[in-house]
Amino acid sequence: MNSLVKVQDWYEALVEECNAIRVERFYNSNIEAITCYGEIGERIVEDKNYQKFGKGNGEFNKRLFKDIGIGESVGYYCIQFYQKILQEHLETGKYQDVSTAVETIYPKNITWTKIRALLPNKKEIEPPTTEQIAKYQQQIIQGDCLIELPKIPDKSIDMIYIDPPYNVDKAEWDTYGDEEFKIFTLNYLKEAFRVLKDRAHFYIHFPANKACWLENLIKNSFGLEPSSRLIWHYRNLVMGRDAKGKYLNTYQPILHYCIGGKELNFDTEWNDERFDVATIATPQTNFKEGKEHIAQKPLELLEWIIRTGSNTGEKVLDFFAGSGTTGVASAKLGRDFILIEREKEYLDIIYKRLNELG
């Protein structure tokens, strides 16, 4: 029994500290995101218990990466990044820590995609079968949203939820010049409002430090103001080792627009779903859906939004689908849905998650 407790203690400490690194660093800047990956790799590789129990153990690593909230593929590359590039520099004393190494070795505009290209490839997840694809082929679209959205008829969608690029340079798909990003954002917003029905709901997820910019852009360009400003509060596992001149960020806003006065689908019983703040843990051990995308949002959060923002049988659209959480929540709640995702890696994950629902 004592041995089991000790194993649980070191494992929980490893998960908690890696989660804290991810929450603290990832959304700050491109270099911070890459530092996040390196520090997670360092924390895992340098853990003596991991070397004893986890190294080379595929099932153990799969569970570990899921609990950390980074997905199996990202976890693999975190370890490779530390071992193949950073570890020698730190062991020889050339650099004091991972942060200094990353900031010295790489330019500020380096992307994780470019670093991954230098590392040994990981075997990709097993692709979906023909039968798995056929089951959802009318609802899942691979392609660029600005190319695929114009193919959707006017006023055909009951609800949209999107978690778009933020232009925080965390990957190539999230790197734009300021004017380029504004034009890109306006283009997809124009399409979103075109496909929504006269009575509908629109939700857009955006980081706290940029939500005001987005709100003003929508108001000035489309004459719309938010009906609600939802807050996703995720206080768990925030440590703030480097935060000395600011308070820790533990929330993200979601702008909600009620189109045409459509009522929200609240339960007849008074409960917490009516409030504009939802406290839901960031993905970790208590999230059964795992973590397959670095920007993946909790299934519980999407279920709340879709349950209250749409009715059974209505059609929900997410054109930045990522790992498909919007589709999973929609399917569980009896909604129709359309998902658009550009990257095939995530299309395979979407098919896998939906088919696991049965």
Image: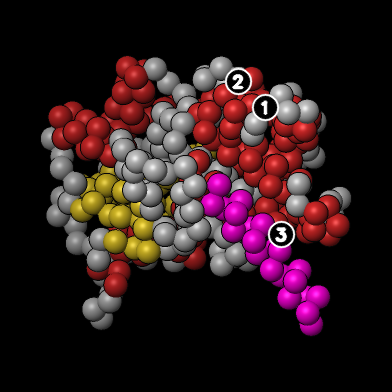
Q: Give the CA separation, mark 2 to mark 3.
A: 33 Å
Give the residue at x 83% y 52%: 51
Give the residue at x 29% y 61%: 277
Q: Give the CA separation, mark 3 to mark 1.
A: 31 Å
Mark 1 Cα-neighbour bin, 10 Å: few <14, some 14–19, many ≥20: some
What number is the disc on residue 95? 1
Give the residue at x 22% y 48%: 257
Give the residue at x 70% y 57%: 64
Tell which tag, 2 or 1, sits nearer the viewer: 1
Depth order, front residue of 19/74? 19
Residue 61 found in image quarter: bottom right
Asked whether the residues under the numbered discs 2 and 3 touch, taking CB atoms below 8 Å apart as contact, a structural biologist would say no
* Lower position in the chain sequence, tag 3 or tag 1: 3
Give the residues in magenta: 1-21
- In percent of width and height, residue 338 lies at 46, 47
Residue picked out by circle 3: 63
Residue 116 found in image quarter: top right
Q: Is residue 9 magenta-colored?
A: yes
